[in-house]
Image (tube, rainbow, N blue to C red):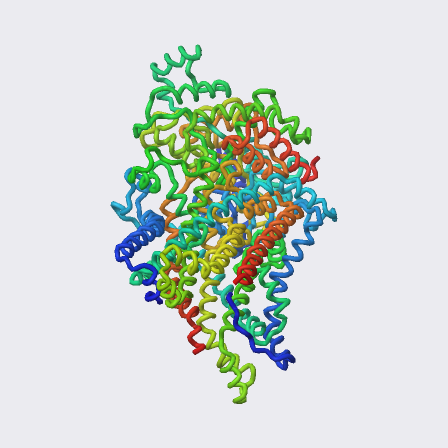
Amino acid sequence: MKKRLLVTTALVSAALIAAVGSAQKKWSLSEAAAPYKGTKLTLATVAWTDAVKNISAEFSKQTGIAVEVVQIPGAQILEKTLLELRNKGTAYDLFTATFKRPYTKAGVAQPLRGFLTNTNLADPEWNRSDFVRASNFFQDPDKGSNIVSIPFGASGMGMFYRKDLFADPKHQAAYKTKYRRDLTAPRNWADFERVAEYFHTADWKSFAGAKGVGVSLAATRAGDPLMWHFALLSAGAALEKGKSINSLLDTKNALTFEPYSLSALERLQRISKFAQSSYLQTDDTAARELFLGGGAAMVITWDSFLGRLGTGEIANKWSLAATPSRTLLGGWSLMLNPSSKNQAAAFLLAQFLSSQENDMKMFELAGRYPARASSYKSATYKAKNPYGEILADSKERGMFQVDSQVSGQFNATISEGVSQMLAGQLEPKAAADKLASNLNRVLEDAGLK
Amino acid sequence: MNSKGASAFSQKKTMATVALVLAVLLMVVEFLPIWWMFVTSFKQDGQFFTDPPQWFPSSITFSHYAELFTNLRFTEFMRNSFVVAVITTLGSVGLGAFGAYAIARLGVGENLFMPMLFIQRMAPAAAIVIPIFLMITGSGLGDTVWGIALAHLSFSLPTSVWLLVGFFRELPVELEEAALIDGCTRWQALWKIVLPLAAPGLAAVAILTAIGSWNEFFFAVILSSTPNSQTLPVALSNLVVPILEIKWGAMAAGGVLTVLPVFIFSLFVQKHLVSGLTSGAVKG
Amino acid sequence: MTDSHPIKRKKSNPNAVFAWTLLTPTLLLLAVISLYPVLRVIWLTFFRWNYITSPEPQAFVWFRNWVRLFEDEAFFGAMRTTLIFLGIALPIELLLGLGLALLLNRTMQARGFIRAILLLPMMLSPVVIALVWKMMYASPFGPLNAILKGMGLIQEDVLWLASPQLAMVSIVIATVWQWYPFSFLIFTAGLQTISAEEYEAAAMDGANNWAIFRHIILPHLAPFTLIIMLSRIMDGFKTFAIVYNLTGGGPGDATNLISFHVYRTAFSSFNLGYGSTLAVALMLVMLVCAAAVLWLSQRAKGAK
């Protein structure tokens, strides 16, 4: 007995010593940050400013590193950060980015591998393989081994619709009579067109008593909220020929894309007839307001809209489906400024913001979509977002925004072409021709052709 | 000021009444949109657009202003706007006055400089923004109030010189000549005689420069990156063209904050502009 | 601006040193921030330069950018849009300003106050103009539509920014609203240069109101009209903030005014060589316009 006790004691104390020993060696943020105490970081973010500030304040408390959070509108962030990096400016130490190639091709993306393998800086519990694909990749898209960014939030477009209307027997019967199909959430663009037409002509009213429209559309050019149409174009094209605008980067010739863009433009023109008459002056906010007021049967918008739907008259009357064809996916990641004097501290902040705990916290505080696969599996998340799965298994059901050094110009060019067609300045064919030649010009200017 | 002459043009009293009514109507038209911005800045969320519209809010809140000063950092933007306007004004009126005096009175390089100034004054910001951008960011002045003020000087200095040359030419030469004969140096004459005489003109130009700089958007939006240098119009634009959420109340309150100092200022402008324009009285 | 004033100047200038001392700091600063940019932007038109791929100009391409300019529909489209914008806004501003100046030339009592109110919009930042009109044009329940409905002028909401033609009209309304007080001020100053004797003499001759307007007022106001036109045409080419903040150049390219177009081409494509070419072309067009107006004013002076 005595012997056993002795052995046990020895074992226990050995275990204790080992535990204490490893606890002493265990990585801690405050220790890792000790050399950088007193420095000040500037973080440029595209959105969710309050939540980022909140989490950064916690970071400052633990590290003594001050953080200033600056918000830059989405229409400007690519241009601003690129110019800043090109000028070797130091206004931002780290920033959110949605495209990577503009930075890697310009040679202004800071490699991160050195930080990730530095045992003083890298948190061993920070799991690199836990990110969903929709949250944007780590890598330099052209050199897989070169890590240039840390995923920070996923996003996807969703189709929000009025489930009360869709389930109404009256509408179901009328729809079946008219189209010889069941009224369900549309899965492809042809379906979408039919449903939009039906609800645009059918007799139903908004909560305020106005005539309801088929689909709520946002197409003002101020602030360029035309991602919707971009989604439609690429998704529409992807549906019809299994190709998308991404193929531009392979063929280097926009003419190959033209037949698909033409059919997508024609479809968009037909769909626009089933939208509110003011859609050309409607921005994303107003398009969402219309749906919130019960004035539209469907709206396609970024997933962050979920945050607005919990209250009011709409609360129990909406549902969410993937956008027809394939869902357009995006996401944001954090990149470091290569000219920053505080790179190590900036890396620590990026790591902190994208930790498992803060990934969920960002969702809870700002409705920003998690980047980590584990977050999507958590019960809290599942309860709040039925749409999460689509993002989590994005490989099959999503398609990504084209990531190229000319992404910004692509979007601007497409916005212009789509807007000219919608405004009635160009017929779809002329718009598609012009789009192709303008896209070719963009490729040429960038030396890609 | 010469109502006597005008009355000869038409004597009908009814016409005068009609004129007054029309004028008041036009005034209301000019004032209404500004009034709408003002009342919107005090409206509670959900009351911005109602049927019928509320020209007088049913209840008042100061929360939008509170948000501007806490969360949206308008204190910093106001500071930046103020600093930029002061640097620009001091630079363009200070340097402009000496340069303009040399050109107007001493006749140096007039034929060369006046056309040049005219071209620079006319050149739109969009035409020179590329080199200005390269120069300012290249010299490390990107995202600083100094950089923005320098960009503002690129158009306000030529304008100031151009206007001040006009003002100096209006001043009588005799006083200066008398001072010179009395043994004053050129410098003394300039400081003691010319500048005080030109004060109304200098004030008018200074005020116009300050307002122009305070309101300027194009250079400010291109050259600023953070609240370190962003001015009020830039911050305001970020509220007017938001991405997913438009805050009507904060936007209107930001507009009021941008406008208010200028309105108060413009009361002075009126005085100085009038006195500047009527400084011809000195001639007598 | 009107300097018939003779300047007393000695032939040999003993004050040259003093003058140059005064002038040098101003000239130096002007050379750096005003002259150098103009020269550099002209120089840059001869280069191919994608700023993002290269921090330095990439190749000297002679006149290739200029050749491209002449094939560039978007540039000429933006120029045309700007001229249409000016062609609508400027006459309205002139007429409103003139009308109001004539009206108020008689009612003296309230003029100071009215002028103070009319000065307000001119003092506003263009961003505030965009903000104010974004609210006025809002739909549904926007204040402007509510007023028009209340007056019985319209039944349905007008969607001010939702069609190419109306969006242009909306930009014009906002611009006229802000700037016709400027023509009012200048015309008022112009009316004050007409002496009482001239009116009286005309009245003695039995001239009616129209004759007085035609033969006395209009000739006096001609130079003032040119001042307004010159200033407002230049402003038209510079119009940027209201487009940026209110319409983004749309719908389509209906309100894509030239300054906005140049900015977007240079800064969203980072193509500095071609962006500079657009900038210089814009500058040239403006100079031609300014020269035309000045030539007109010289001719008007000569005709007198």
Quadrant where the N terminus of chain B lies? bottom left
Residue in front for this viewpoint, C92 or A438: C92
Q: Please report the residue visible at 72 percent of the width from the left and 47 percent of the height from the top.
A: C63
Image side of residue B93 versus residue B269, left or right? right
Image side of residue C231 versus residue A298, left or right? right
Residue in front for this viewpoint, A269 or A205: A269
> Where is residue C201 shown, x and y percent of the image?
38, 66
* B284 versus A283 height, above or below: below
Quadrant where the C terminus of chain B lies? bottom left
The furthest residue to the bottom: B182
The answer to whether one can see residue B146 in this image is no
> Where is residue A186 shown, x and y percent of the image?
46, 19
* A295 versus A39 height, above or below: above
Image side of residue A191 versus residue B3, left or right? right
Residue in front for this viewpoint, A148 or A36: A148
Residue in front for this viewpoint, C10 or A5: C10
The answer to whether one can see residue C296 in this image is yes
Number of labels in the image equals 0
Q: Please report the residue visible at 60 percent of the width from the left and 48 percent of the height from the top.
A: A83
> Where is residue B111 shown, x and y percent of the image?
63, 68
> Where is residue A57 shown, x and y percent of the image?
45, 49
